[in-house]
């Protein structure tokens, strides 16, 4: 999908506009400039057209001496990434020097720039918005992100400015395998090792790969696509901005892949950011593999693969079905095992379970452990069927679907995995009224 980015100086209402367009309270809004600190990335649908939206509101450090430099870098990074740019200004305060500077850079952009005069809460302020034509853009959209006034015409303009989506090649069924993970864990090194030649720059500086790179290769008679999602080059003064866009690229790569391979740094182990990225891929129902890189640097006498696997699965909790492989991208040790596992997970993701076999497993499972009663009534699962593949979805028909709680869903999921596999594949179980 196309990417639309919200930019502008602090405290003009970027996060409020993000919340309005994505219809959620994901962004924290406050009168203090720079209060947005976390990843802000969502999807928007308007008149049947979908696009990705990113809020850059949290990218500006709080210290005054770094303020303008960070904003300039933020705009430059946005120009690298976005298909359409939303330049948000504040009608209540009028044009500022920082608005002028940002506008000067955006006027040289190749992408369409839509000027949003926010906080146009009444007729007088909508008239005041005409002042912003002085910034040199063709059209100004006065709106109020708080109450939604004016967002309809504005969204029509956004949709009209989006680039045409490339037509999907229906004959291209090559599995897409994305390497994801923190900077400097070896994503580019692994890609180069598998391709057999240096396609991406590999250095010890975290984040030297600037773009997500697709590479086609033939592996054991199957064509596959490798996606290296390494992040941006890091500069000390814009560290927050660079890490923000590195994560943004990772999320978009996960969206468009079939199997996500999370690379871990063996000596460092699983960190909270690794677990968050893996759970995000799981929520998108992608195939999952964990590759522990730099295993040649780990002391074997204290960290066996079995102990490491147990520790990771305990840390991940409900994601203990994800297979783990231990590799060295530098030496090539077990590097191809990553592809073997990824293709195995890809095939498992499209597995179809015959209805009769599924119901036999479910019947034995419910006999071994009956569903808990709901409001004093027995809960009985009549039958089940796989209603979708890629990713797999199983529908269970019962008399009281609301009586099936999460722990029992987990129990049924485990029984399905024991019987039919689905290693590395997130399963969806839905319960419907019979």
Image (tube, helix red, strand yellow):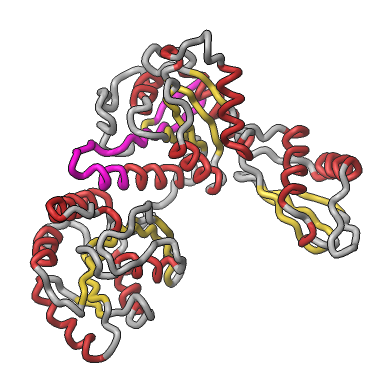
> Which residue does the image show at 51% across and 43% down from the upper left?
281
- Quarter occupied by residue 239: top left
In magenta segment, residue 417: no
- Quarter occupied by residue 296: top left
> Which residue does the image show at 70% across and 32% down from the upper left?
421
- Can you say which quadrant of the picture contains the N terminus? bottom left
Q: Position of residue 285 (x, y in %)?
A: 56, 45
Q: In this rendered view, identify the residue nearer to me: 85 or 18.
A: 18
- Quarter occupied by residue 373: bottom right
* Residue 352 in the figure: left or right of residue 327: right
Magenta residue span = 216-245
Question: Residue 136, relative to residue 409: is it above or below?
Answer: below
* Residue 22 in the figure: left or right of residue 72: right
Q: Position of residue 74 (x, y in %)?
A: 21, 52
> Which residue does the image show at 37% across and 53% down from the upper left?
38
Q: In this rendered view, identify the residue nearer to me: 218 or 102.
A: 102
Q: Position of residue 25 (x, y in %)?
A: 45, 65
> Which residue does the image show at 55% across and 43% down from the upper left?
282
* Res 347 visible: no
In magenta segment, residue 225: yes
- Can you say which quadrant of the picture contains the C terminus? bottom right
State the residue lying farthest toward the bottom: 123
State the residue lying farthest toward the top: 301
* Res 231 visible: yes
Question: Residue 87, relative to residue 257: is it above or below?
Answer: below
Question: Residue 411, relative to residue 103: is it above or below?
Answer: above
Q: How many marks?
A: 0
* Residue 133 in the figure: left or right of residue 393: left
* Residue 292 in the figure: left or right of residue 86: right
Q: Position of residue 313 (x, y in %)?
A: 60, 31
């Amino acid at each position: 999908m196309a990417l639309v980015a919200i930019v502008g100086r602090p405290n003009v209402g970027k996060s409020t506009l993000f919340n309005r367009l994505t219809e959620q309270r994901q962004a924290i809004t406050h009168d203090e400039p720079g209060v947005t600190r976390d990843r802000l990335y969502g999807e928007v649908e308007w008149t049947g057209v979908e696009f990705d939206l990113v809020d850059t509101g949290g990218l500006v450090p709080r210290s005054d001496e770094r303020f303008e430099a960070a904003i300039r870098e933020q705009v430059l990074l946005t120009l690298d990434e976005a298909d359409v740019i939303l330049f948000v200004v504040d009608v209540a305060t009028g044009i500022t020097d920082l608005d002028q500077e940002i506008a000067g850079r955006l006027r040289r952009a190749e992408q369409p720039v839509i000027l949003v005069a926010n906080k146009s809460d009444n007729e007088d302020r909508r008239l005041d918005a005409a002042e912003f034509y002085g910034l040199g853009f063709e059209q100004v959209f006065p709106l109020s992100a708080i109450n939604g006034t004016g967002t309809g015409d504005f969204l029509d303009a956004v949709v009209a400015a989006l680039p045409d989506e490339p037509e999907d090649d229906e004959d291209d069924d090559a599995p897409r395998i994305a390497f994801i993970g923190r900077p400097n864990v070896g994503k580019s090194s692994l890609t180069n090792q598998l391709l057999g030649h240096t396609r991406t720059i590999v250095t010890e500086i975290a984040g030297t790969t600037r773009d997500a790179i697709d590479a086609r290769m033939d592996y054991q008679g199957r064509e596959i696509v490798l996606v290296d999602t390494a992040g941006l080059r890091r500069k000390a003064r814009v560290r927050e901005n660079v890490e923000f866009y590195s994560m943004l690229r990772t999320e978009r790569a996960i969206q468009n892949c079939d199997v996500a391979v999370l690379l871990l740094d063996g000596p460092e182990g699983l960190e909270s950011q690794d677990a968050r990225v893996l759970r995000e891929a799981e929520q998108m129902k992608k195939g999952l593999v964990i590759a522990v890189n730099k295993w040649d640097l780990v002391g074997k006498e204290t960290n066996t693969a079995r102990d490491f696997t147990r520790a990771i699965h305990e840390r991940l909790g409900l994601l203990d079905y994800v297979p783990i492989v231990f590799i060295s991208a530098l030496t090539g040790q077990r590097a191809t095992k990553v592809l073997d596992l990824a293709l195995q997970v890809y095939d498992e993701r499209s597995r179809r379970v015959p209805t009769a076999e599924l119901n036999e497993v479910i019947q034995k499972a419910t006999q071994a452990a009956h569903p808990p009663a709901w409001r004093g009534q027995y809960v009985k699962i009549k039958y089940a069927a796989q209603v979708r593949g890629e990713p797999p979805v199983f529908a269970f028909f019962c008399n009281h679907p609301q009586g099936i709680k999460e722990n029992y869903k987990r129990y049924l999921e485990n029984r399905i995995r024991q019987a039919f596999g689905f290693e590395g594949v997130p399963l969806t179980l839905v319960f419907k009224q019979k």
